[in-house]
Amino acid sequence: MKHIKYLILLTIGFTSVSCEDFLSPLPDTVVVAETYFNSDADLKTGIIGIYDAIQGVNENTVTNDNRVNRGVIFEYLLTEHRSDNTRSQTTEGSRADFHRYLVNANNVQSEDYYASMYQVIFRANNIMKYIDVANPENVAKYLGEIKFLRAYAYFNLVRLYGDVPLVTEVVLASNSEALFTRIDKAVIYDQIVADLLEATNSLDNTYKSRASKAAAQALLAKVYMTKPNPNYVDAKLLCEDIINTGGFNLQPNFHDVFYNELNSEIIFAIQYQFGLDTESQSFSAEFTSTLRQGRQDGLNMVNQNLIDDFNSKGGTRTAVSYHTFTSSSRTEVTKFLPEGSNVLTVPPTYGSNPQSAGNDWIILRYADVLLMHVEAAIATGTSTSDPAAMVSFNKIKDRAFPAMAPHSISNVTKNDLLLERRVELAFENHRFFDLLRFGVADSVLSQHAAVMGYGDYNTRALLLPIPAREINLSGGLLTQNPGY
């Protein structure tokens, strides 16, 4: 997948969007697509191109913050920084606006992420238009993969921006209104569920770096528990189906989850390749501050309240997740250290090319499924003693505290689970969404903002502003979120 991405871009370009703006397709792009998608092989290559929009472009290749598809490279800003987990090292620049709840409609990182997710959606829609050129035995499989990716993008958008335009087919200039009409989030969720149901019925578990049945099931379970009218029963069944397949296991060593890539715990990850600017990522370097390996002064610095939770509940996860430098008293994320790094040496080293890191970005892993299993068992209650859910929870605790294994915890409260998810999945962009899903985002973040002195926090911060650029392109048709 890594080695054919730029062939795709050179061949089809942004087939469903124009070179003028992300959300306005040109009629002649259809001609480009028609001349390219002529065979099953063409379609397969085009599907791989959808992953490129998620992978994004390393800032080393194009440093301009404007009009570049960064994909998930900026995602930690929109998620971890807006939770109580992390912050920027400084207060300078648009990146520092996220942790202080100062993001406005002109924020370039938010704009880029919004556009990147629509890149995923438009490429998916465009390829589906030509599905009839696929070999008959591949049609269902290709459609399932495409719809999984579209659902993934819409799930991110609806959680971050609320009501968004719902586009499920190629939109020509004559019908551009569809690109700028916000649709109620309940309808968006219906489409996400429909897409993921199709994916679960047509995919197998061949891949970890591409869509799979387990990835669709895990994402659907999370969708079921997030949507306005949660479906905990089916979410639990989906988690149990993944568990019962026996195809996934926790890595015995927590370190190996992140440095033994595509291991038995990984369900879905986006791959990067070390040292190759066109296939690498830059966020690993930006997580450093003491020796400043990235272009910024340091991002994703760990907050003290998270350190406190690690001290009480982290176990073996603590040393892998972050490191505090005695020389600077700064605490930095170490789950995604660039190749060749070693923070335990004096002075620490960060390898030969930390700004072109090859660390995969993990979107779904088995530990998340085990904890979702417990969450679905709690459902609308405050705790659970469900035997199967307790088995799942105890597996997590056994790895984190092997000296105390086997654990025999028989009851887990909602607060217990939220804390466990925090230390298990820290810096993997789950915390903000967990707070929303558990219904405690406003209370937790308002308290966090008060402690940190972020006086601009209010409930509007639970949704990001619709990018002003898109509103301007729409001629005012696209409306803004309240308070912006």
Image: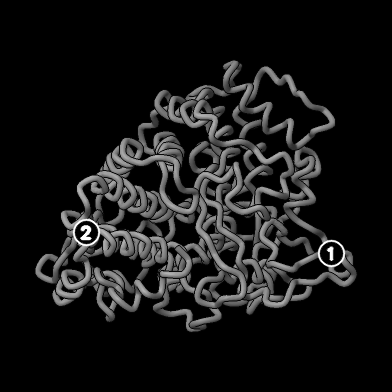
Tell whether label 1 touches label 2 (CB within 8 Å). Answer: no
Q: Quadrant of residue 203?
A: top left
The residue beneath circle 1 is 325
Q: Is residue 320 left or right of residue 160?
A: right
Q: Amino acid at mark 2?
A: Thr
Q: Is residue 38 visible?
A: yes
Percent from the top left, x then y, of residue 134? Answer: 21, 54
The answer to whether 103 appears left or right of 193 in the picture is right
Please tell me whether residue 456 is drawn above or below residue 85 in the rendered image. Answer: below
* Amino acid type, mark 1: Phe
Residue 39 horizontal/vertical position (percent): 22, 62
**Which quadrant of the view contains residue 110?**
bottom left
The residue identified by callout 2 is: 181
- Tag 1, which secondary structure? strand
- Which residue does the image show at 30% across and 76% down from the upper left? 11
In this rendering, is residue 134 above or below 477?
A: above
Residue at the image point whose x is 66% and y is 37% from the top: 420
Q: Residue furthest left?
A: 174
Reply above or below: 162 against 374: below
Residue in view at x 71 percent, y 59 percent: 333
